[in-house]
Image: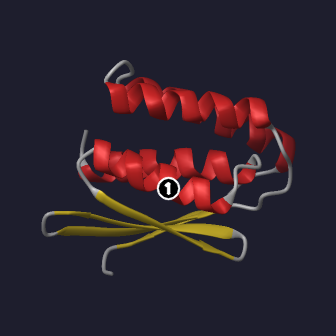
Amino acid sequence: MTFEERSDLVLALARTLYVNGQSTDQTLAAAEQLGDTLGLRARIMPRWGELQLHAEDGDARLISVVAADPTGVDMDRVASINRAIEALRAGRLAPAAAVRRSARSHERRRRRHGCSRSRRGQAL
């Protein structure tokens, strides 16, 4: 996976946790651990209505932002994503499979709550 794909995966899984009722502290910790697993330094910064990811891999740096309003609680989805993160960390799940799982989760939520926005920057 490319640096950008790994960063996108961290942000997507963190967003899924955050908008579905996972505590902010647990979301931040899960994103950092997943980043470590994927070989990058990842920090999530929650902002009003969005999550911002600061990712580094050697000299490469990326800032990504995604809309994230924690408007509902779906602890089944939170548990599913937490299991996926644990499976990734243990090497039982390939990153590509986690991307598909996250995309399905995001699409279901988008259909229920409307589209999200995303924008990218290149400098920290």
Label 1 belongs to which residue?
Answer: 29
Determine whether 86 is above or below 25 in the image: above
Residue 123, located in which quarter of the rendered image?
bottom left
Which residue is the extreme one toward the left? Answer: 59
Counting the numbered discs, the total is: 1
Which sits in the foreground, 74 or 122? 74
Describe residue 89's horizontal placement relative to residue 86 as left or right.
left
Three-letter amino acid code of the residue under disc 1: Ala
Q: Identify whether 75 is placed above or below 34.
A: above
Disc 1 secondary structure class: helix
Quadrant for the N terminus in the image: top left
Residue 119: % across, % down: 51, 68
User: Residue at position x 60%, y 61% from top?
Assistant: 25
Question: In x, y percent, where is residue 20?
Answer: 75, 46
Q: Position of residue 106 (x, y in %)?
A: 66, 40
Q: Is residue 93 left or right of residue 2?
A: right
Q: Is residue 99 visible to us here?
A: no
In this view, the residue in front, 84 or 12, is 84
Residue at figure coordinates x 58%, y 54% from the top left: 27
* Image x and y of residue 81, in percent: 59, 34
Question: Which quarter of the picture shows residue 78?
Answer: top right
Q: Quarter of the image containing the C terminus? A: bottom left
Q: Residues within 10 Å of mark 1 (few under 14, many from 20)?
A: some
- Viewer-nearest residue: 101 or 35: 35
As drawn, which residue projects farthest toward the top?
92
Residue 45 visible from this viewpoint: yes
Q: Look at the image and name its color scheme.
A: secondary structure
Q: Residue at x 32, y 68 (%)?
A: 62
